[in-house]
Image (cartoon, grey):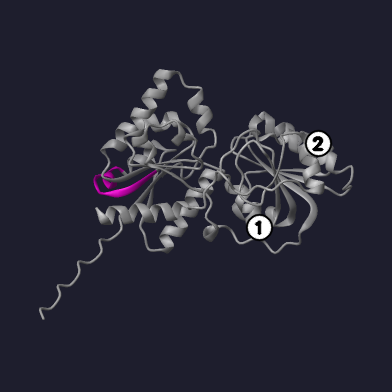
Amino acid sequence: MAERAASAPSPEPLPVLQWAQEHGEVGGVRTSHHQLTSVLRAEGLTVDYVDTGSARRAAAMLPRLAHRAVHLLHLTRLWRAMLLAPAFALLRGRTVLVLHSGSTGGQVARMPWWRRRALVLALYAYDEIWAVNDEIGTILPEALRSRVTVVTPFDPSAAPVPSSVEREPHALALSTNAGLPHYNADLGVEVTRLVRERWLDATLTVLAYGNDTPAVEALRRLAEAEPWLTVAFDSSPDEVSTVLARVGTFLRPTSWDGDSVIVREAQAAGATVVASDSAPRPAGVVIAPLDAEAIAAAVLDGGPVSDGSGLAQTTLAQAVRAAEASLARG
C-alpha cells in the first residue's frame, strides 16, 4: 500500500496587535486587554500594541502593519470606530472591533439617521465585531450581524489572585470613573448611610480612577467629614484586588453598564455584588431598582439574583483562538 503523504503542518498563528491606550487608559478596558495579553503570551502567541493614546508610539509600529496579524481595536466610542475604519479596511490579516461599552445602544439611538447609516457602512471595514452585549447586533443588517460575537471582557485565568486579608462582612466598596454621573457614586454613599442604620460598623471604599475631577474632589471632601468613607484614586491592580477581597459587598449602582470587569473581579474575590437592574448582570449578582432604599435593602436582606441572561461567557482569549482557527482554515 502506498505510503500516505504526510499531512501539511498547521500554519503558525498570526501575531496579535492590540490597538489600545496601552499607557494612558485606565479602568476596565485597560484591565481587559492587559489580561488578554497575559493569557495569549502564556500560550506562546506574539502580542504587541499599537498605542492609540500616543501618535509617536503608534507611529513606531508602522513597519509592523505591512505584515498579516490579528488586529484588535479596543474602543468604547463608536465614532472612533468610524474614524479608524478606512485604515482598518487596508490592514492585512483579520480585523476586529472590540466594543467594551454598555452604552452602545444609547450611542446609536442618539445618532441622526445619516450618521447611523455612515456607521453601518464603516463597520464593514471590520471582519469581526466583539461586543459586551448584543445591542449593536440588533441595529445591524444581517450581513453585519453575522460578524458579531458577544464576549465577556473578564478572563478569570488572568485575574489577580485575591488577597488573603480578612473579610469584613459590613464593608462595602464601589468604583467610579472620574466621578461620572452614570456611576452614581453619590447614590452609593446614600446607600451606605441607610445600611449604617442597622450595621453601625458599615464602611464604604470608593475606588475612583481616570481623571481627577471636581466630582472626585467632592467625594474626598465628604470623606473628611465621614470617617466611614474612604476615597482611593487610581489604585494599582493589587490594591484593588485587596479591597475586593476585604469587603463583604461590592456596589454597582450604575445608570447603564456593560459586562463590567470589576463586577466579575469582585465575584471572583468572593464579595457579594449588589447592582442596579438597569443592565444585564453576571449570574449571581443581587439586583435591585436604581434607588438608594431598594439597594440598601438588597445589601441588608438580599434580593433577586441575576441568572446571567444577556451576557456571554466567551472570553476575549477564546474569541482570539476562534479567529486564528478561522484564518488557518481559509
Q: Residue furthest left?
A: 2
Please name the residue shown 52% across and 55% down the image: 155
Real-space CA distance between mark 1 and mark 2, rounded to the nearest whole angstrom:
26 Å
Please name the residue shown 36% across and 24% down the image: 118
Q: Left of 30 or right of it: where is 194?
A: right
Q: Left of 180 or right of it: where is 20?
A: left
Write down the residue under mark 1.
Answer: 269
Find the magenta span and give its range: 62-72
Residue 178 visible to an observer of this rendering: yes
From the top left corner, tell me how far across and down residue 206 is, in percent.
Answer: 71, 42
From the top left corner, tell me how far across and down residue 297 is, in percent.
Answer: 81, 42
From the top left corner, tell me how far across and down residue 258 is, in percent.
Answer: 56, 40
Indicate the amino acid at tag 2.
Glu
Q: Which mark is residue 253?
A: none
**Element class at badge 1:** loop
Let me know if residue 68 is in the magenta part.
yes
Please name the residue shown 14% across and 72% down the image: 5
Indicate the amino acid at tag 1.
Ala
Closest to the observer, 204 or 293? 293
Corner quadrant of residue 256: top right
Please name the residue shown 89% across and 47% down the image: 200
Let me know if residue 304 is in the magenta part.
no
From the top left corner, tell me how far across and down residue 316 is, in percent.
Answer: 45, 51
N-terminal of the pair, mark 1 or mark 2, is 1
Write down the residue under mark 2.
Answer: 293
